[in-house]
């Protein structure tokens, strides 16, 4: 019998395991094998691999410093906003840490205490209440077996099986399908680009430089001409002056966008949700790492005194985080309103002018 079982060993799950792993008998599972992706198609995790300022602050609060092995060139200090229909471009100063997301997750997992039972290549099939505990059905290495735990934590992302198991206890959240391609790039692009075009999506698209490659990504409605919309994005980017070569690999995965704090679900008396599984993700930027760290820390704080009646304490603790989601939703109504965004970009408010050296 485990005290706590955590489904998902990404930033939320690994952080929670690190924080409580010495206090409880803990099981941590993840369907991934945490191996470097190869060329072709990967569908394990779709992430641009940028640490936003909010996530950087949380790493500081957790007392962590990034190892150089997870960093990617170039480091980014500028965001380029491109409104394609309005033919507008603006640059804004921001500092993102550019990293290799796969190595970042492996590093966080390496920090989990040795006493934690970590099982990779293991997925949660289902769970059910059995008396005073939960019976978990797990699949690993071609076999299916069961384990029991007093508390189950869902840290298994946007397609969370733990959240689905709660049924009507959780309000549905708007889902997008995020598609990314790693392509060869022909010249240096030392900035992260946010691309807006409602012909493609009512959310946003992006480009992120990674060493000799460029990530091209978009948050698209599932099953609504997804491939055609992504091809249209690449065509329009070329029309905006982007130069890139052949596709090295493609990634895809679901992405949640809570349209209100009421769509965040923290769980019930025996099940807790953290990170994107709960709906903790910015509605304005799709940034989720800071929420993963914050929600894991809050749950760890309420579990440490005693696990009994943790659900109410966790729900109360996340009040400020829900208010943050509310404020981000207000911000998103400005960013994704074409007329308001156009007015702000035309004003040049808070934008910076990029210096172009003279051509000889």
Image (spheres, rainbow, N blue to C red):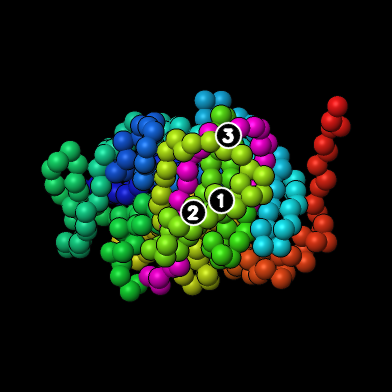
Q: Are marks 1 and 2 in contact (CB under 8 Å)?
A: no
- Residue 230 circle label: 2
Q: Quadrant of residue 151?
A: bottom left
Determine contact: label 3, label 2, CB under 8 Å. no
- Specify whether 140 is left or right of 100: left
- Please tell me whether mark 3 or mark 1 is closer to you in this view: 1
Instruction: Report the residue marked by disc 3.
Output: 185
Distance from label 3 to label 2 (Cα)? 18 Å
Instruction: Depth check: give the residue in front, 25 or 153.
Output: 153
Q: Which numbered disc, 1 or 2, marks the residue closer to the eye?
A: 1
Check disc 3 and report its element: helix, strand or loop: strand
How far apart marks 3 and 1 lie (CA) works out to: 15 Å
Characterize the magenta stretch by its predominant secondary structure: strand
Q: Who's the residue at 56% across and 29% down the image?
A: 212
The spot of residue 26 in percent (x, y) is 30, 43
Give the number of the disc on residue 235.
1
Q: Quadrant of the C terminus?
A: top right
Residue 105 in view here: no
Residue 249 visible in the displayed image: yes
First to last magenta residue range? 170-194
Q: CA distance from mark 1 to mark 2?
A: 9 Å
Question: Quick check: is 185 in the magenta stretch?
Answer: yes
The answer to which of marks 1 and 2 sits earlier in the sequence is 2
On whether residue 186 falls in the magenta region, the answer is: yes
Q: Nearer the viewer, residue 209 or 13?
A: 209
Q: Residues within 10 Å of mark 3 (few under 14, many from 20)?
A: many
Task: Sort mark 1 into few (<14), some (14-19) or many (20+) by Cα contacts within 10 Å.
Answer: few
Q: Residue at the location (63% across, 66% down)?
A: 336
322 over 255 or under it: above or below: below
């Amino acid at each position: 019998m485990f005290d706590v079982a955590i489904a998902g060993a990404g930033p939320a799950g690994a952080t929670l395991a690190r924080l409580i792993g010495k206090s409880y008998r803990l099981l941590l599972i993840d369907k991934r094998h945490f191996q470097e992706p190869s060329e072709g198609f990967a569908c394990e995790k779709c992430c641009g691999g940028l640490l936003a300022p909010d996530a950087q602050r949380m790493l500081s609060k957790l007392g962590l410093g990034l190892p150089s092995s997870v960093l990617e060139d170039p480091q980014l200090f500028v965001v380029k906003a491109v409104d394609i229909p309005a033919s507008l471009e603006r640059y804004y100063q921001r500092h993102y840490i550019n990293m290799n997301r796969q190595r970042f997750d492996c590093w966080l997992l390496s920090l989990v205490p040795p006493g934690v039972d970590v099982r990779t290549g293991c997925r949660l099939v289902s769970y059910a209440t059995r008396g005073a505990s939960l019976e978990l059905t797990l699949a690993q290495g071609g076999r299916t077996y069961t384990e029991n735990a007093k508390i189950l934590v869902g840290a298994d992302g946007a397609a969370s099986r733990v959240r689905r198991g709660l049924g009507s206890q959780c309000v549905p959240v708007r889902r997008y399908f995020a598609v990314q391609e790693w392509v060869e790039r022909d010249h240096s692009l030392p900035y992260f680009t946010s691309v807006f075009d409602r012909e493609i999506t009512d959310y946003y698209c992006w480009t992120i430089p990674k060493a000799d490659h460029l990530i091209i990504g978009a948050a698209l409605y599932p099953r609504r001409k997804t491939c055609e919309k992504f091809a249209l994005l690449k065509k329009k980017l070329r029309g905006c002056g982007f130069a890139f070569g052949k596709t090295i690999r493609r990634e895809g995965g679901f992405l949640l966008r809570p349209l209100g704090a009421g769509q965040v679900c923290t769980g019930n008396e025996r099940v807790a949700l953290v990170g994107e599984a709960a709906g903790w993700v910015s509605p304005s930027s799709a940034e989720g790492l800071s929420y993963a760290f914050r929600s894991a820390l809050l749950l760890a704080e309420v579990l440490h005194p005693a696990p009994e009646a943790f659900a109410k304490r966790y729900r109360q603790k996340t009040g400020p985080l829900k208010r943050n989601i509310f404020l981000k939703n207000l911000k998103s109504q400005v960013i994704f309103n074409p007329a308001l965004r156009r007015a702000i970009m035309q004003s040049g408010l808070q934008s910076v002018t990029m210096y172009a050296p003279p051509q000889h």
